[in-house]
Image (cartoon, grey):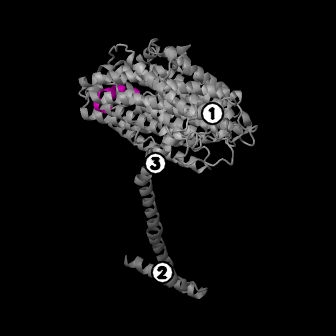
Amino acid sequence: MSEYLVQHCWLVPVLPLLGAVLTAVTGRFLGKWAHLPVVLGTGLACLVSLILLGSADHPSTVNVYDWLNLTDMHVSILFRIDGLTAMMLGMVTFVATLVAVFAAGYMAGDPGYARFFALVGLFVFSMTGLVLSSNFVLTYAFWEGVGVCSYLLVGFWHSKHSAADAAKKAFLVNRVGDVGFALAIFWMWSVFGTLDYDTVLDPNRVGALKESAQFWIAFLLFWAATAKSAQIPLYVWLPDAMEGPTPVSALIHAATMVTAGVYLVARSSTLMAAAPAVQLIVCAIGCLTALIAALIGLTQTDLKRVLAYSTVSQLGYMFMALGSGIGPVARLAVIAGMFHLFTHAFFKALLFLGSGSVMHSMGHVIDMRRFSGLRQRMPITCWTFAIGGLALSGIWPLAGFFSKDEVLIAIASASHAAHDVGLPEWTYQLIFVTALITAGLTAFYTGRAFFLTFFGPEKLPSPNDPEAEPGEQLAHHDHHGHAHDHAHDHGHAIGHESPPIMTVPLIILAVCSVGVGMVFGPWSGSFEELLASTPSLSALSMEHVEHSWLVPILGTLMGVGGLGLSYVLYGLRSPVPGILATRLKPLYLASYRKFWVDEVYKALFVMPTIILGDIAAFLDMYLVDGLVRLVASVPKAVGTRFFAPLQNGLVQSYAAITAFSLAVLFLILVLW
């Protein structure tokens, strides 16, 4: 069965695409059942993907269609099945299916219900096509497809200005990254003469390149990844992507778009490993991104925005692992990064869908200053969110514990291997310490979000609640530390647990957040064996690393410490956060205002572009259009001055002019 499906692996992207087309065509007639074609298509794609896992030990390619067949260039739609592809397909389709089921309840009654699910199906089609691709041209085509779908889904509620602006921001920022991908493709074509993975990622071919080509191809691929996977300086689009419906946030932040950049770097690991300087850049950028995003997440009051910055931070963790892939620990680092991507997909999808459940219950209010104490009203959402938060914090025995420690071990191992490849050891040692600090910050802001939402006195949003300003008491306290309890006048209308169609996916994802770490963790070796069948990874060096309890102990201490501190400050409703926010207001405002990065971007790029556009519009209106009107007025003036008098209505005059004209013509012909 699995061998048969390998030859028909094209079913994985085609089934969601077919569901998207059916929903788009028949959605008006299906009404509230318009989600069924996409849910069924994605679910069947997931089933096929899970069966394909059994054939991942033997990499194979399937020629689906000859796309370009020119004199000097032949590009086929060639799909590849190997360990990395099979893992990504199973993860993407499984999470996407649960998100689609959840969305059927969350989006119920929306006027664009059918359009939403058609776009979701198209999104899954693009992402599965991307990971199945066997050459960089096809990868780039699906890469752009993912970008277009994200634009359409983030701006789904396009009449909402913030959503429309967020969609444009995501689209434009990602185009900056796509320039790097395009340049890398041109460069690879010029030096390899082909863009097939088997040739471009062949260690012998890569090793024969000049050092400059090795450096710049690897750097350009990482440039592309910084946009798709939201790394400094191109991360600014991802926090705003939450303006789309919450299921979209779960898809983008957990299983689809943001993982594309990490996947590209992992797939290109042979090229990356040949350029240790680029690896250090990857690791340093990931470290800086993880730290800054975690610092911003400490003070955000929008639950989805906290999770958005958490995604940026965890993506930084993945790049820290991938950037540690130097020398003899190259394969260990790539496996660690991809394992964290794998586990992160489950618990981050769980957390985003949990926030969507809260938002659904709170009448689409997501500001944590306007509600609290929801654990009694929403027990399933509360405790599944808690499981996701513990996994994100890296607490044993949840999935995040195993993958986070794998990342830390990879960074620690790179610090020992750095000298062998000509890199300073202290760089990776500093990155390791920063990664530990970030782990503590992650646990703290995760616990803060959980306790502010589900603990404390019960408080439901009221239209009369004033919006708190930055610097006011974060923990909903007055100056004496007494909690305010603003009960909603219509408490029976909101504050209910979500329906089963929304809570069942939460329960399934919670089980996965607990189990996937133990099933696929380091001691089982199954994840490592799965990825070892990937040619570009099997060629990397793999040094045995002695097991040390020090790294897991340090990581766990940071996680437990962060959660414990968040419980003391927010679970017990301490007045300390408000006091600190007041006394350290500059630092607090820097975090709350996201270090004014958006303002800097606006000053450096947005405003100059707007000014340039205004200048161009002025020149177009008054110079170009003026010249056009001037040229157009010449025939009119000449006609009015010389030819209009000839149109006098006298037949005799017309006959005389005709006779004169014929005489002149005859004279010209004779003389000629």
* Circle nearer the N terminus (2, 1): 1
Q: Relative to the observer, which residue lies in front, 54 or 113? A: 113
Name the chief secondary structure element in magenta.
helix
Marks 1 and 2: in contact by CB < 8 Å? no
Q: Secondary structure at mark 1?
A: loop
Checking the image for residue 78, the label placed there is none
Residue at position x 47%, y 40% in the image: 296
- For the record, the magenta segment spans 266-278
Where is residue 605 drawn, in percent x and y?
41, 52
Q: Residue most toward the top?
A: 524
Checking the image for residue 598, the label placed there is 3
* Circle nearer the N terminus (2, 3): 3
Label 1 vs label 3, nearer the camera? 1
Query: Residue 82 appears in which quarter of the rendering?
Result: top left
Q: In the rendered structure, which amino acid carries the disc numbered 1?
A: Gly
Q: In the rendered structure, which amino acid carries the disc numbered 3?
A: Asp
Q: CA distance from mark 2 to mark 3?
A: 57 Å
